[in-house]
Image (cartoon, grey):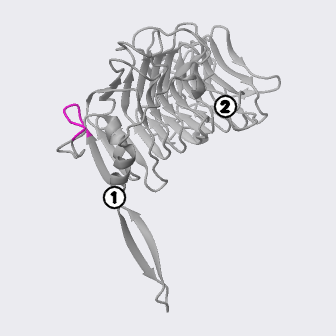
Amino acid sequence: MVSPDNLAVARSACPLAALLCSAASLLFLFALAGCSREGSSEQLVVPEVVRTNLYVAPGGSDANPGTEAEPFRTISRAAQVVTPGTTVYVAPGQYTGGFRTEVSGSPEARIIFQSSERRGARIVPPLDSRTTSAWDNRGSHVDIIGFEIDGTQYQSGNKWLNGIYNAGSHNTIRHNHVHHVGVDVPCEGAGGAGIIVDSYHKGTQSQVIGNNVHDIGPAECSFHHGIYVGTEARVRSNLIYRIAGAGIQLWHDANRVEVTGNTISTSGAGIVVGSGDYHHTSGPNDYTVVANNIVYDNKQGILELGQTGEHNSYRNNLVFQNTIADWRLPEGRKHVGTIAAEPAFVEYSRTGTPDFRLSPRSPAIGKGLPGDTPEQDYEGKLRSKATGYDIGAFQH
């Protein structure tokens, strides 16, 4: 489906970038903590990261220092000066998309981009778009939390094909609202997605958790997906609907993917487990777990395509009313604990904004497997033995 060679990703570079990064590195301080071995003067020196905050607000200026009192105006300016351990707080308001973030954090000092109010920071197309992704992240150990990516305000230039494109490793894309991306583009093989976790630049082991992804791709086009995964990853507690292709598509180097606790509706397919067109591996997609998902009212339900292994498992999913077929697995592959019944959402329709929470009569309540259940649901509610483990994105 998607290779960055086919994406018109902006490759412009600011001539001051090197200078800015050098200046920013001076802010990355280390506190040295020493401890002596008994009977010895030898000391073990342990560096400690001094964590910093930066701020972005609609009324700010990129000439500001990025403090809470004097914030930046754009996320891209903050991304030029972040260092490991930095949290960038983005105030509610509208921001121009089509930018790239490239700096990496570390396991001990992640870089965090966070909307200070969940989904209050709204990213929209620029006046003259030069990229096909709203947010192109190439850094690793990075968190992107709580943004709205809204492709409805296209004006001119390149139309967005992707909401959040992630090419780094060990990243988390959490609690974002990605919608109306690529809905009026030609149906072409390059395709696109609301959220992509890609292996092309050797990214791996990222997480896509608690996002709302809907209205992605032109009608009847199988090349545009909700969440697209091309490597090892976790895809948990996402709400996905009205996707031209698959709600969740696994391809390229995808393997050992955990697809758990998602709700997918009104799409070309619910979940596609596959691999092929490899970038860095030889496949197959094996040891992938698909459990505790609701896949309802799509054209196809859950299927395998391409090269897949013998150890993929399908457990305790509610799969129902998918018009072509609920299941399409290789001969001999079994799904267990499946519920074939209407999920009884609080309020459901194929248009507008359905309420995918579970009504008290839902057969999904209490039927999830504890070991395959995300710790939190879409809204952040904890799942536990006391509450029971529900199937789908919402815990009742």
Q: Is residue 118 left or right of residue 328?
A: left
Whether residue 82 can be seen here: no
Q: Amino acid at mark 1?
A: Leu
Mark 2 burial class by Cα count in 10 Å: few <14, some 14-19, many 20+: many
Q: For the view shown, which residue lies furthest in the left direction?
A: 69
Image height check: is 228 above or below 376? above
Q: Residue at x 53, y 12 (%)?
A: 266
The residue wearing badge 2 is 315
Mark 1 burial class by Cα count in 10 Å: few <14, some 14-19, many 20+: few
Q: Position of residue 76 (x, y in %)?
A: 35, 36
Whether residue 264 can be seen here: yes
Residue segment shown in magenta: 56-63
Q: For the view shown, which residue lies furthest in the right direction?
A: 332
As helix, strand or loop, the secondary structure at mark 1 comes to loop
Q: Residue at x 78, y 27 (%)?
A: 333
The residue wearing badge 1 is 26
Q: Is residue 32 left or right of residue 227?
A: left
Image height check: is 78 above or below 220? below
Image height check: is 297 above or below 36? above
**Nearer to us in this view, 138 or 45:** 138
Q: Whole-Å distance between the Cαs marked 2 and 1?
A: 51 Å
Q: Amino acid at mark 2?
A: Arg
Residue 61: within the magenta?
A: yes
**Which of labels 2 and 1 is toward the front?**
1
Q: Is residue 148 left or right of residue 336?
A: left
Q: For the view shown, which residue lies furthest in the front direction?
A: 15
**Nearer to us in this view, 5 or 193:** 5
